[in-house]
C-alpha cells in the first residue's frame, strides 16, 4: 500500500490534474489524501471579502467533498489561503503548511501543480512543494513527486514565458476516466461549456489524446520531478 498526497490550489484542480490517477490509486488499495490550499471564491471580488460568499463556499465545498468521494479519496482537507492571491503570502508560510501536511500524512507520492501554469497560486504551490520535499536526512522521505497539467491554466501560458509542460510520465486511466468525468460533473459551477478548455468534453478529449500518446484509450500525463528508488 502506498500513501498518496494530492496538493492543489483550488477546488477542481485536483480532479482536473489527476482525478483518474487518484481513482486508480484508490482502487488498487492505496490511501489517497487530497488537500486544497486556497479557498477558491474571492478572486471574483475587487477586494477579498469572505463574509460576502458564505453560501458560495457551502456549495463549492460540498462539491469538493462529493468529487473527492467519487474518486475514492480517504481524506479531503480544505484550507484558507487567499484565492488567486497566494503571491501575497510569504512563500515560507506556504512551505510550512505543506511540511505539516507531509508530516501528518507521510506520503510516498505527491502530485501537485506544474511551475509553468498561468495561475499564480499554482506557481506558488509548486515552489512550496519542491521546498518541502527536499530530501533532507532525518525528514520523512517522499519517494516520488509528480507535476500535473491543469486545463485552462497550463496550456494558456505563452511560449518562452515559463517552463513548458513536457510530459515524461504517463498513467493509463482507461478504467477510471469515467470516475474522473463524474467527479468533474460534481463541480458543475466550476466547469464551462464546450469549447472551453475546462469543459467535460475537453477533459475527455485531453485524456484520450494523452492516451493516444502512449497507445492507450485514455491517460493522464505528468512531469516527473523526483523519484527515489530505495
Image: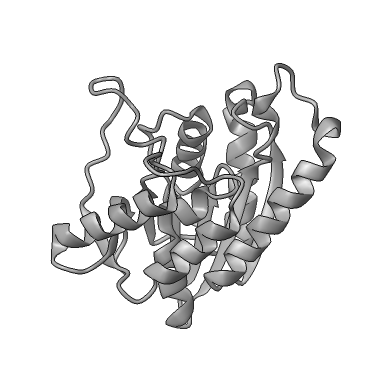
Using the rendered image of the protein, determine whether residue 199 is visible from the camera's viewpoint. Answer: yes
Q: Return the residue nearer the eye: 217 or 72.
A: 217
Q: How many marks?
A: 0
**Colour convention of the picture:** one colour
Q: Residue at x 35, y 77 (%)?
A: 175
Query: Looking at the picture, how far across and down is residue 202, in whole percent?
Result: 35, 49
Residue 68 position (above or below residue 16): below
Residue 75 position (above or below residue 121): below
Q: Return the residue nearer the eye: 219 or 136.
A: 219
Using the rendered image of the protein, determine whether residue 108 is visible from the camera's viewpoint. Answer: no
* Quarter where residue 51 is shown: top right
Locate the C terminus by quadrant.
bottom left
Q: Residue at x 76, y 42 (%)?
A: 56
Q: Is residue 186 left or right of residue 79?
A: left
Q: Residue at x 59, y 47 (%)?
A: 98
Q: Residue at x 51, y 32 (%)?
A: 124
Query: Looking at the picture, how far across and down is residue 200, in whole percent?
Result: 43, 53
* Quarter where residue 117 is shown: top left
Q: Is residue 115 left or right of residue 96?
A: left
Residue 196 position (above or below residue 120): below
Q: Is residue 54 left or right of residue 154?
A: right
Query: Looking at the picture, how far across and down is residue 137, in whole percent?
Result: 45, 54
* Quarter where residue 185 is shown: bottom right
User: Residue pushed farthest front?
Assistant: 194
Amino acid at each position: 500500500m502506498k500513501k498518496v498526497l494530492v496538493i492543489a490550489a483550488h477546488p477542481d484542480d485536483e480532479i482536473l490534474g489527476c482525478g483518474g490517477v487518484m481513482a486508480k490509486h484508490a482502487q488498487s488499495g492505496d490511501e489517497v489524501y487530497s488537500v486544497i490550499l486556497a479557498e477558491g471564491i474571492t478572486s471574483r471580488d475587487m477586494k477579498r471579502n469572505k463574509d460576502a460568499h458564505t453560501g458560495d463556499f457551502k456549495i463549492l465545498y460540498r462539491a469538493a467533498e462529493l468529487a473527492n468521494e467519487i474518486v475514492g479519496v480517504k481524506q479531503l482537507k480544505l484550507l484558507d489561503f487567499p484565492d488567486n492571491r497566494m503571491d501575497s503570502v510569504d512563500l515560507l508560510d506556504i512551505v510550512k503548511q505543506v511540511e505539516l501536511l507531509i508530516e501528518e500524512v507521510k506520503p510516498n507520492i505527491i502530485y501537485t501543480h506544474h511551475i509553468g501554469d498561468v495561475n499564480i497560486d499554482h506557481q506558488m504551490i509548486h515552489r512550496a512543494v519542491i521546498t518541502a520535499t527536499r530530501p533532507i536526512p532525518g525528514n520523512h522521505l517522499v519517494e516520488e513527486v509528480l507535476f500535473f497539467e491543469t486545463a485552462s491554466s497550463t496550456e494558456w501560458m505563452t511560449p518562452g514565458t515559463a517552463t513548458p509542460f513536457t510530459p515524461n510520465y504517463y498513467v493509463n486511466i482507461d478504467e477510471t476516466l469515467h470516475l474522473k468525468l463524474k467527479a468533474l460533473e460534481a463541480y458543475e459551477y466550476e466547469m464551462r461549456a464546450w469549447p472551453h478548455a475546462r469543459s467535460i468534453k475537453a477533459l475527455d478529449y485531453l485524456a484520450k489524446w494523452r492516451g493516444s500518446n502512449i497507445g492507450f484509450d485514455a491517460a493522464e500525463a505528468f512531469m516527473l520531478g523526483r523519484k527515489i528508488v530505495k
